[in-house]
Amino acid sequence: MTSLFQHDCEQHLRERWARVCGDQPTEITISTEPPLVAGPYTTDGLRCPHGITYWIEPTGEQIAQWARDGVE
């Protein structure tokens, strides 16, 4: 999606996510396109004040790391 103005909503979401994770950083993907397949970590999209919807999910590498670590 292309906008006619600049905004930092994606960066703001990344910063908020990092604060939530604290000392347990989590690799995420932020996209303006909904996931093709709903997975166990799929949530509803988040709409920013500019009308753009963002989907946030852990990366495949992050999910694989959780599996190796036995995280449920």
Image (cartoon, rainbow, N blue to C red):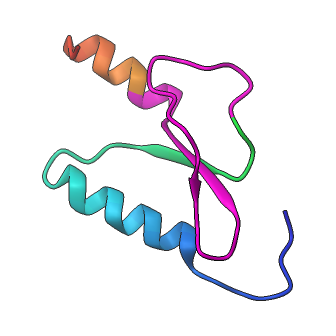
- Which residue is at the far left? 23
Residue 38 place in picture, x, y as percent: 61, 20
Lateral position of residue 44 relative to residue 13, left or right: right
Residue 21 place in picture, x, y as percent: 22, 50
Quarter the C terminus occupies:
top left
Magenta-colored stretch includes residue 67: no
Q: Quick one: 22 or 55, which is closer to the camera?
A: 55
The residue that appears at 26% across and 48% down in the rendered structure is 25
Q: Quick one: 6 or 23, which is closer to the camera?
A: 6
Lateral position of residue 65 relative to residue 40, left or right: left
The residue that appears at 43% across and 62% down in the rendered structure is 14
Quarter the N terminus occupies:
bottom right
Corner quadrant of residue 64: top left
Please give the range of residues in magenta: 35-62
Residue 31 place in picture, x, y as percent: 66, 50
The residue that appears at 33% across and 23% down in the rendered structure is 65
